[in-house]
Each structure stands twice: as C-alpha cells, then as structure tokens.
Image (cartoon, rainbow, N blue to C red):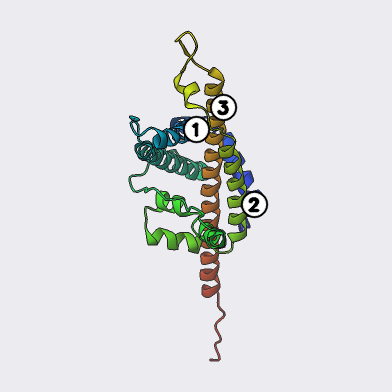
Amino acid sequence: MELKPDTWAIYSETSRITKDHSGHLLALSAIFFLPLSCFYAIYISLSFKLLNHFYYNQNQSINPLFLYLLYSIVAMFFSVCGVSSITYSVFHAFYGTQFLGITPSPYFIGISSVVLVVLPMLCVVMYLQVRWILVPAVVVLESCWGLEALRRSASLIKGMKKVALILLLFFGLMEGIALWSIPVMNINLLMGSQNGTGRTTFDWDIVLGIVGKSLLLMIYLLYNTVANTVLYILCKGIIHHEDNKCVNNYVSLPLDDNV
C-alpha cells in the first residue's frame, strides 16, 4: 500500500509511539532533556544578572563568557545524547523491533542551530531548515555526516516540504512560547538573599517555576524529536515504494515480437 503521509499522519504516528512507549521515552527525556531544560532556565536567570554585574563590577569572580562556555558544553552533551537515543528508540518502535537501549550513536554529531540575524535571511533559513530537517535522523540511523547527511536529507524530503514546513512552524511556535515563558529571575532569589537580620532567605516559588517550565520544555523536545524521526521513516518509505514501482514497471514492459 502506497504511503501518502500528511501532517495528520505525522501527528498520529507521533502520538501512537509516544503513548505506546511512554515509559521508555519519558525515561530518556528525564535523563537527557530535563537536565537540558533546567540548565537553560538557570542559565537565562544567571546570565542577565552576571552580565549586568560584569559592567559595573569588574572584580566579580564569575565571568559571563565562562558561564556561556560551560552552558554550551553541557547543552551540547545532553542534546546530542537525548536526540540520538530517542531517535534510535522511535525508529525501532515504528517497526516493532527491539530497542537498542539508551546508548547514543558514536557517529552522531551536534548540529548547530541557525540563528536569525536579519529579517531578509528568514526565507533562506526556513528553506534550509525544511531541506535539512531530517539531518539528525539521517546522522543517527544511516551513520553519515557532513555534506553527505545534508544531501541525503534534501533528497528524502522532496515531495514532503509542505509537511516539514508545518512541523517547523508548529514546533517553532511551541518552543518560542516555552522559552519566552521562562522569566528572568533574580539571582538573589536563586542563590539566597540577605534579609534585615543577616539570615539567608530562599524563595521556593522560583524553584517550582523552573521545574515546571523545564518539564514543559522537556515534553516539547521529546515530541519534536519523535515527529522528525517519524517524518524520516515515512519519507524513506515513499522513496522505497517509488523505487520498487519503477523496477516493477521496467520489468513488466511489454515486448513487441515484431520488432
């Protein structure tokens, strides 16, 4: 049967896989995406305060650049491990085969996100994002990287660019809402502040806010990774079906005995 996936098909498969294997996928998300979300929420809170102190107090012990480098290393580690392990799990869940565990692929490399600098670049960035949306799945499942992974993603996504664009816009909107909902919290409330009696106070509302929004960001990252993997599987299935159809048509060409 020919596969004709659309946005609803991607959503249905994503929901089915996350529901049938919720325990396994949530465990991976808690191990990799939850720490990533927490680090992001804390980094946003600390960076603004430290950057402000850096300009007015040159003697501070923590440099904002060091904080950024530390966050980049931690974010790269957890994102690479999380995306690779969940991609492997979704791929095997789709075909009903045994999971390979949570060990990430040694061939998986980090993919730098495209930063929008000026508005005229928006169309170009969106076009490249649509063409390369399958790169993480290609890198993990086909063990290829670099330009080869980019070309492979562009060839697989042909005919499915509209669906890929809808997924990008949807998850991009969800990510924007999740990230902008994280307030810039006062570092004094996070680390403790001195009250009039000289004792240190601690605001648990800030901590609960970080935990709650980190969980929302973790769920977003999980569904985004699952949806992209399902899109890769369906795109590959379409190409495989078309290749088999071309071969069958070639084999079944009628022979003219009069020639």
Disc with the residue nearer the chain's start (2 vs 1): 2
Of labels 2 and 3, earlier in sequence is 2
Residue 16 appears left or right of 133: right
Where residue 204 sits: x, y (%)?
A: 53, 18
The residue at which mark 2 appears reads as 7
Label 1 crowd (10 A; few <14 / some 14-19 / many >=20): many
SS at mark 2 in the image: helix
Separation (CA) of disc 2 from disc 1? 31 Å
Residue closest to the far top: 197
Q: Which residue is mark 3?
A: 212
Give me the residue at 61% from left, 49% from top: 10
Neighbourhood count class around disc 3 (C-alpha, 10 Å): few under 14, some 14–19, many 20 upward:
some
Q: Secondary structure at mark 1?
A: helix
Viewer-side residue, 162 vs 18: 162
Work out which residue is located at the far bottom of the displayed protein and give it: 259
Residue 201 coordinates in the image, percent (x, y): 49, 14
Q: Nearer the viewer, mark 2 or mark 1?
A: 1
In this rendering, would 127 be left or right of 140? right
Q: Of discs 2 and 3, which sits in the foreground? A: 3
Q: Nearer the viewer, residue 62 or 102?
A: 62
Q: Residue at x 35, y 31 (%)?
A: 62
Inspect the image, locate mark 1, and give the three-letter code of the amino acid beneath it: Ala
